[in-house]
Amino acid sequence: MNKINVCFSPALYEYYADNSTVVVMIDAIRASASICTAFMNDVQFILPVAEVEEARNLKLQGYKTAGERNGKKLDGFDFGNSPFNFTEENIKGEKLAFTTTNGTQAVNLVKNDKHKNVDLVIGSFINISALSEYLVKQKKDILILCSGWKNTVNIEDTLFAGKLAHLLLQKNEFEIPEATNLALHIYKNAGNSRFDFIIHNSPRLKSKLEFLENDIKYCLTEDLTDVVPFLKNNKLHI
Amino acid sequence: MNKINVCFSPALYEYYADNSTVVVMIDAIRASASICTAFMNDVQFILPVAEVEEARNLKLQGYKTAGERNGKKLDGFDFGNSPFNFTEENIKGEKLAFTTTNGTQAVNLVKNDKHKNVDLVIGSFINISALSEYLVKQKKDILILCSGWKNTVNIEDTLFAGKLAHLLLQKNEFEIPEATNLALHIYKNAGNSRFDFIIHNSPRLKSKLEFLENDIKYCLTEDLTDVVPFLKNNKLHI
């Protein structure tokens, strides 16, 4: 029987990583939703980069650049990390270099993991049903990798992990270790008021509500798209 | 206002560590309960050691030795990691060298953390009320450090963290970050059938039930003792 595990922080990845696993990278608010939105609007591909300078150099080579540090848009970049940036008008046919505090760091962790034969896909609420269909078809172990917040555990990625595990368990049987059960409990307790639950449980997000409210609501909306971005040759494609 | 934070794995400690914090080391099943039981039965002091060989050398210097790896007693050691080993008859007046897969590793992490001015105390269900009284009196930030299982997140330490946070919030106001809210949700969902909840949520513990059931039940019993072991000069005392 295949397993669904949940890794709550990129800093724990090495203790959860295994061969022949599909890793689902989640940075529920906001990188995952931004990446899916860009593909929904026909970006050519996305190059996740860890360093700001690397993205700046790619801009000189014709890439569009998007990114933030601590939630703020970077100087000289075309876009920040709000999913509302990645409209068809802004992004169609473009190559995009993308760097964020947490999300692209997690992608790079998997990308640079030479010892494991892992696939990486991007998961967000906006593609969650298509993603769960895709994952069931792989017939592999699944590792939901939460980007967290600067390597600490966050509420929104945990909630997403719980919802995804719940959807997968409706489609198939899986082995469920304790970390996955933790996420399932959080999903269960969130109920239908997901936005209120997240704001109530995260002083960090509550403090940013003034400028993030619309983004958060968008990022929590299910099934806006069927795209399932995956990593190949160090780039994200669909 | 002081803060209660929860660190779900020793491998995340560096991202949660802060100056002037009281760190509560928990390895709810079984190291924390064993340590508290040893002090309840008048052990002189406990020296947490990371390496098995170090404990073996201390035995030659008159220490009693206790420890396990992967839940199994170590060859040549006086005791394993079952709290039932640490009777008055076995331990009164003795110096004890102690090494476990997860618990003493976490203690050593804090012990070797030269940059922070932290206090370390041992928390378990068997001393939880005395511990919460002690912590409130310190008027400091509190970091509940879960030992986890080989650096992965476990259910029993998370449940303990939630219960301790719940007790502290009954006594005082604290700032509650999202990791602490996650633990509070787990505590809430566990309800009064704590043993059943843990076994139901942890295939790891369920698979060991045959030889761990009595130990687990003991480790989940509240308030058997008022001792609050603390680290001083690299040794645990009361």
Image: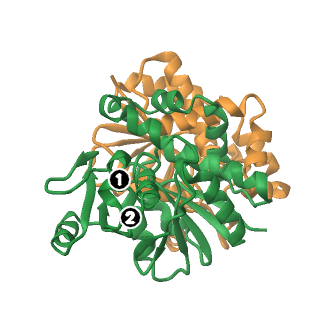
Chain colours: A orange, B green
Q: Is residue B185 above or below residue A97?
A: above
Tag 1: amino acid? Phe
Tell me the tag on residue B43. 2
Taking the image as shown, residue B50 lies to the left or right of residue B106, namely left
Taking A33 as reference, is A169 left or right?
left
Which chain letter goes with mark 1? B
Seen in the image, is B85 located left or right of residue A69?
left
- Going by the image, does A218 lie left or right of A146? right
Up the image or down, A173 lies above or below A155; here it is above
The image's mark for residue B151 is none
Q: Residue at x 35, y 67 (%)?
A: B93
> Looking at the picture, does residue A83 appear above or below residue B58?
above
Chain bearing tag 2 is: B
Residues at marks 2 and 1 touching, judged by CB atoms closer than 8 Å: yes
Neighbours of disc 1 within 10 Å: few (<14), some (14-19), many (20+): many
The one of B129 and B119 positioned closer to us in this rendering: B129
**Circle 1 sits on which residue?**
B86
Q: Quadrant of the N terminus of chain A?
A: top left
Q: Amino acid at mark 2?
A: Val
Residue B147 in percent (x, y) is at 44, 55
